[in-house]
């Protein structure tokens, strides 16, 4: 997926920032961006847009932010320091959310219908109020008018490779522009010595990523001679660190781009004889392993496939073995309410993805496997800090990303994704957990 950059940039208004937020181009290619190039039109769109606009205005009137309209109207209870959402084309914004709900919120930002100098701050306000934005009677009707997940994006074996490729095979160079040298695309775990998480700097990120990996390897009992299965290779950092301990690693991925770079990094480090990186679905793994480690891969499995994910781990785990996973989680009630929803993140970022709750992980493993959750640690604040650093880095590399062929609409999409994610952790709506499982009998 490559795109042509044909736009300039607009200055970010964050004090002290040297980065620039990509501005939307005057025209948007409808072949590249069919859902963004033009807002819905026609009588139905007009009626739905007016209704959505009324609901939106009613909701933001009681939220701690400022929504500024071109005619001078300001909505929200926020004071001078509150995050500001600036409407550029309110009619187009309302038409999009009337047609597609929260998908329209993201598409309207991609199109430039609204702006925000503190995008994560605006989205955090919405995330904190997610249960009350839409009146309860209307929430019960969402399934009647909001889009459903296309069958081609369900994570059946015939679809999973395509779903993964749409995100992870975009370009290794794209990811290298905002990730640290470890190429770790998951939450770091910062030490206390790094300082307050809200202000921790870029220089602390690579070490914090390695600390996160080392903790997982420790919890999985990985030592010299261990046979390790890694589900979800990423770009190879966990395999590298496990091999450095003297372990042998079998790592599976469905991203050909990730496989190629991971193999290159592993060979350069001298561990090609200890690490195998296979382009393989996790369901097809055979053999026996002393430790199974999986970092933020369960989110791509899909609600209906969680049993087989854990059954696969259970099947290949050697007697006495341990499992350590890192998983982004959401509240159980919201998970149940949204398990059939099709969201902006599904459409543009992670097709087929879905976040579990801790309760769901415990329930699935109890009902379908001999594995039991023995220990877990929440570290959502660390993910908020990680995402802030990625966001700052991505914005600072806007020119380089454009030179790779990713246009301003893509860059606004990616910025929305990073800020949307950070808002979830900052609001407490999302968490990330390191979870340890094994087969020990429960203590009486």
Image (spheres, rainbow, N blue to C red):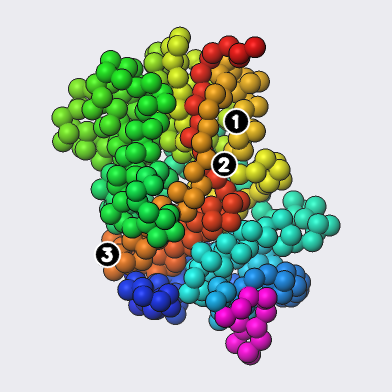
Q: Which residues are magenta?
A: 68-80
How packed is label 1: few (under 14 Cα within 10 Å), some, or many (20 or more)?
A: some
Q: Earlier in the sequence, mark 3 or mark 2?
A: 2
Q: Position of residue 166 (x, y in %)?
A: 43, 48
Which type of secondary structure does the marked residue at label 2 adopt? strand
Residue beneath label 3, please?
A: 400
Extreme residue in the top direction:
319
Quadrant assignment, res 275: top left
Q: Position of residue 115 (x, y in %)?
A: 51, 75
Q: Earlier in the sequence, mark 1 or mark 2?
A: 2
**Is mark 1 in CB contact (under 8 Å) with mark 2?**
yes
Q: Residue at (35%, 51%) from the top-left corner?
A: 194
Q: Is residue 427 left or right of residue 395?
A: right
Residue beneath label 2, please?
A: 329
Q: Position of residue 281 (x, y in %)?
A: 43, 29
Q: CA distance from mark 1 to mark 2?
A: 10 Å
Q: Residue at (55%, 76%) from the top-left corner?
A: 81
How packed is label 3: few (under 14 Cα within 10 Å), some, or many (20 or more)?
A: some
Q: Nearer the viewer, mark 3 or mark 1?
A: 1
Task: Look at the magenta stretch and give its main secondary structure.
Answer: loop
Instruction: Give residue 265's mark.
Output: none
Q: Earlier in the sequence, mark 3 or mark 1?
A: 1
Q: Residue at (16%, 36%) from the top-left corner?
A: 268
Q: Is residue 225 left or right of residue 62?
A: left
Extreme residue in the bottom direction:
71
Q: Is residue 401 above or below residue 242?
A: below
Q: Is residue 281 above or below residue 124?
A: above
Residue beneath label 1, please?
A: 361
Q: Residue at (15%, 29%) from the top-left corner?
A: 270
């Amino acid at each position: 997926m490559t795109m042509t950059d044909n736009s300039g940039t607009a200055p970010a208004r964050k004090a002290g920032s040297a980065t620039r937020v990509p501005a939307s181009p005057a025209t948007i290619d409808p072949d590249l961006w069919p859902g963004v190039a033009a807002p819905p039109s026609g009588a139905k769109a007009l009626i739905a847009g007016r209704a959505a606009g009324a609901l939106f205005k009613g909701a933001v009137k009681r939220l701690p932010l400022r929504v500024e309209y071109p005619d001078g109207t300001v909505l929200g209870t926020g004071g001078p320091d509150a995050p500001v959402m600036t409407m550029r084309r309110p009619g187009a914004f309302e038409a999009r959310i009337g047609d597609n709900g929260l998908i329209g919120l993201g598409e309207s930002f991609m199109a430039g219908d609204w702006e925000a100098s503190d995008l994560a701050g605006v989205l955090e306000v919405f995330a904190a109020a997610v249960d009350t934005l839409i009146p309860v009677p209307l929430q019960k009707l969402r399934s009647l008018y909001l889009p459903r997940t296309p069958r081609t994006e369900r994570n059946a074996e015939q679809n999973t490779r395509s779903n993964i490729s749409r995100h992870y095979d975009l370009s290794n160079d794209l990811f290298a522009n905002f990730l640290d040298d470890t190429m770790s695309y998951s939450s770091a775990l910062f030490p206390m010595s790094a300082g307050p998480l809200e202000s921790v700097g870029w220089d602390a990120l690579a070490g914090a990523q390695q600390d996160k990996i080392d903790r997982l390897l420790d919890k999985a009992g990985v030592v010299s001679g261990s046979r390790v299965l890694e589900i979800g290779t990423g770009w190879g950092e966990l395999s590298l660190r496990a091999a450095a301990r003297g372990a042998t690693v079998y790592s599976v991925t469905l991203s050909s781009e990730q496989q190629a770079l991971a193999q290159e990094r592993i060979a350069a480090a001298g561990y090609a004889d200890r690490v195998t990186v296979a382009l393989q679905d996790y369901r097809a793994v055979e053999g026996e392993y002393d430790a199974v480690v999986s970092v933020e891969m369960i989110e791509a499995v899909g609600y209906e496939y969680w049993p087989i994910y854990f059954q696969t781990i259970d099947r290949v785990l050697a007697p006495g073995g341990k499992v350590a996973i890192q998983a982004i989680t959401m509240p159980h009630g919201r998970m149940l309410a949204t398990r059939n929803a099709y969201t902006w993140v599904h459409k543009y970022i992670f097709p087929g993805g879905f976040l579990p709750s801790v309760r769901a992980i415990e329930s699935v493993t109890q009902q379908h496997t001999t594995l039991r959750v023995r220990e877990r640690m929440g570290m959502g604040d660390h993910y908020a800090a990680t995402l802030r650093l990625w966001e700052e880095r991505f914005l600072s590399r806007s020119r380089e990303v454009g030179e790779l062929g990713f246009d301003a609409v893509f860059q606004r999409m990616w910025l929305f994704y990073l800020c949307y994610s950070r808002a979830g952790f900052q609001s407490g709506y999302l968490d990330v957990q390191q979870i340890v499982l094994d087969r020990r009998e429960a203590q009486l």
